[in-house]
Image: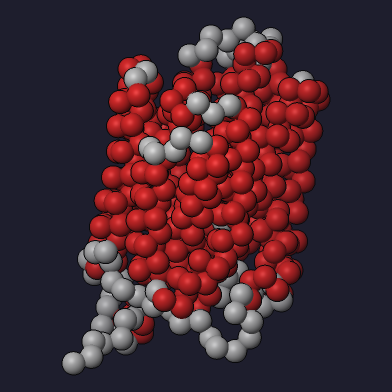
C-alpha cells in the first residue's frame, strides 16, 4: 500500500480541504516557534561560553579560534545553496531534521576537540549544518505558510529566537560564573540537546515537498544575477551584526568612561526590543515596495545610530540611545529583507534561493568583525560616520535592485 503524496498548505487550500481560518496553520506556526525556541536557548549558551571554552579549556589561541570559525563559516557559505536545493528536491522537513541532528553532533563533537585541526573540522561541520538548517527551515516555512503571511510568521520566529537567546545567555552567564570545565561541558551538552529537541519538534510538521522543475540548471540561483545583486546589498546591510557583540564593547573599553556592565544592558535592549516589537514592525511590510522602503529607512536609522555611538566618549548615556536606534534599524531591515528574500524567489526553488540569500549572514560574520573594528577603532568618529554612510548607501541601493529583479521576472513579483 503506497502512501498519499505529500501536499503543501497551498495545495490543500486550492483543493478546498483547508481554510487558513482553521487551527491547522496556527498549529504549524506554533510548532515552528517551539523548534526555534528549543535550539535558540542552546545558541545563547554557545554564544556566551564558546570563546572562553575554546581558549581556557581546549587551549586554543585567539588567532586559532578566529581562523577556525572563519573557515567553518566559509565552508557553510559554500554549502548553503546545495543543501537548500536538497531541501527543494527531498522535502524541507526531512532535510531540516537531518541538519538539526547534524548540528547537535557538531556541538557534541566540540566536547572532544583537543587540537586545532580537530577544532577546524568540527567548526566546518557546525557552519555547514547551521547554514543548511537555516535554508531548509525557510523553505519549510514557505511551504506551510501563504506568501502574504510569511514575513509576519518569520518575525514571530525572530522574536522567539531573541527570547531563547536571552534565556541561554543567562544560563551561559552561570557557567561563566562557575568557571569550571564541568560547567562549560554542561553548557555545550545543553546546546546539543536543544538541537535534538528541535529535530523532534520538527517531525510533528507534515512532510511537505516542493519538487524542483527538471528543466533549466539545477542550481538556478547561481545564474540569477538580479537576485545576486539583492543578496549582495543585503549582505552589506548585515554588517551591523558584529556591532553590539564586538565593536561596541571594544569601543567602550578604548574610548569611553562607561562601566563594563553597560555591555550587558545594551544586549538586553537589543534582545528585548526585538522580542517586543519585531512582529509589529513586520506587519507593516506587505509587498516588495514596502520591503524596499523598510530597508531604505533601516539604512538611515543605522546611520543615526552610528552618529550617536560616535558621541559616546562625551557621555556614555549616548550608548543607550544609539543601541535603541540600532535595534530599530535592525527590525526594519529584517522585515524588509525577509519579504524580499521570499518574494523574489520562485516557490519551487525556495530552498536554494534561501540558502543563497542567507549567505549574507556568513559573509557578515566572516568579514564584518575585521572591517568594522579596523574602520571604527582606527578612525574614531570619522570611522563611525563612514560605517553609517555605508548603511545609507546600501539601503538606498535596495530599491533599484529589487525593481530590477522584479522586472526580470524573479519570484512572484
Q: Is residue 199 depicted above or below 258 in this figure?
A: below
Q: How is the image coloured?
A: secondary structure
Image quadrant occupied by the C terminus: bottom right
| Nearer to the camera, 109 or 315 | 109
| Nearer to the camera, 375 or 324 | 375
Which picture quadrant has residue 153? bottom left
Q: Position of residue 384 (x, y in %)?
A: 74, 28
Q: Is residue 225 left or right of residue 113?
A: right
Which residue is drawn at the image coordinates 48% and 14% (left, top)? 261
| Nearer to the camera, 158 or 40 | 40
Q: Is residue 314 left or right of residue 47?
A: right
Image quadrant occupied by the N terminus: bottom left
Q: Is residue 325 depicted above or below 310 in this figure?
A: below
In the rendered image, the residue lying farthest to the top is: 257
Residue 122 in view here: yes
Q: Is residue 269 depicted above or below 153 in this figure?
A: above
In the rendered image, the residue lying farthest to the bottom is: 1
Which picture quadrant has residue 386? top right
Which residue is drawn at the image coordinates 57% and 65% (left, top)? 81
In the rendered image, the residue lying farthest to the left is: 1
Which picture quadrant has residue 325? top right
Q: Position of residue 14 (x, y in %)?
A: 36, 84
Q: Position of residue 326 (x, y in %)?
A: 59, 33
Residue 240 in view here: no
Q: Is residue 156 left or right of residue 59?
A: left
Q: Position of residue 371 (x, y in %)?
A: 73, 35
Which residue is drawn at the image coordinates 23% and 87% (left, top)? 3
Amino acid at each position: 500500500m503506497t502512501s498519499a503524496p505529500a501536499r503543501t498548505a497551498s495545495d490543500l487550500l486550492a483543493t478546498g480541504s483547508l481554510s487558513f481560518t482553521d487551527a491547522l496553520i496556527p498549529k504549524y506556526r506554533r510548532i515552528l516557534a517551539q523548534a526555534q525556541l528549543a535550539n535558540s536557548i542552546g545558541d545563547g549558551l554557545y554564544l556566551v561560553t564558546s570563546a572562553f571554552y575554546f581558549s581556557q579549556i581546549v587551549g586554543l589561541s585567539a588567532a586559532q579560534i578566529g581562523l577556525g570559525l572563519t573557515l567553518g563559516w566559509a565552508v557553510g557559505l559554500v554549502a548553503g545553496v546545495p543543501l537548500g536545493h536538497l531541501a527543494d528536491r527531498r522535502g524541507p522537513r526531512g532535510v531540516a531534521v537531518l541538519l538539526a541532528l547534524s548540528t547537535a553532533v557538531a556541538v557534541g563533537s566540540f566536547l572532544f576537540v583537543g587540537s586545532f585541526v580537530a577544532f577546524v573540522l568540527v567548526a566546518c561541520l557546525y557552519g555547514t549544518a547551521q547554514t543548511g538548517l537555516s535554508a531548509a527551515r525557510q523553505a519549510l516555512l514557505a511551504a506551510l505558510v501563504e506568501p502574504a503571511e510569511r514575513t509576519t510568521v518569520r518575525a514571530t520566529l525572530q522574536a522567539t529566537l531573541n527570547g531563547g537567546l536571552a534565556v541561554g545567555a543567562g544560563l551561559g552567564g552561570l557557567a561563566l560564573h562557575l568557571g569550571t570545565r564541568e560547567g562549560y561541558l554542561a553548557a555545550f551538552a545543553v546546546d546539543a540537546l536543544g538541537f535534538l529537541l528541535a529535530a523532534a519538534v520538527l517531525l510533528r510538521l507534515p512532510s511537505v515537498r516542493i519538487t524542483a522543475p527538471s528543466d533549466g540548471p539545477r542550481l538556478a540561483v547561481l545564474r540569477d544575477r538580479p537576485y545576486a545583486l539583492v543578496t549582495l546589498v543585503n549582505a552589506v546591510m548585515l554588517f551591523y551584526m558584529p556591532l553590539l557583540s564586538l565593536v561596541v564593547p571594544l569601543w567602550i573599553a578604548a574610548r569611553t568612561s562607561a562601566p563594563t556592565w553597560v555591555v550587558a544592558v545594551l544586549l538586553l535592549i537589543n534582545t528585548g526590543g526585538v522580542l517586543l516589537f519585531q512582529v509589529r514592525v513586520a506587519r507593516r511590510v506587505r509587498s516588495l515596495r514596502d520591503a524596499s522602503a523598510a530597508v531604505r529607512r533601516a539604512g538611515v536609522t543605522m546611520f543615526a545610530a552610528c552618529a550617536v555611538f560616535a558621541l559616546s566618549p562625551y557621555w556614555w548615556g549616548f550608548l543607550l540611545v544609539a543601541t535603541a536606534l540600532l535595534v530599530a534599524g535592525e527590525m526594519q531591515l529584517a522585515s524588509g529583507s525577509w519579504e524580499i528574500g521570499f518574494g523574489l524567489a520562485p516557490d519551487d526553488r525556495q530552498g536554494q534561493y534561501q540558502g543563497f540569500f542567507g549567505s549574507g549572514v556568513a559573509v557578515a560574520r566572516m568579514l564584518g568583525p575585521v572591517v568594522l573594528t579596523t574602520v571604527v577603532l582606527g578612525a574614531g568618529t570619522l570611522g563611525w560616520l563612514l560605517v553609517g554612510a555605508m548603511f545609507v548607501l546600501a539601503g538606498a541601493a535596495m530599491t533599484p535592485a529589487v525593481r530590477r529583479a522584479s522586472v526580470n521576472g524573479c519570484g512572484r513579483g
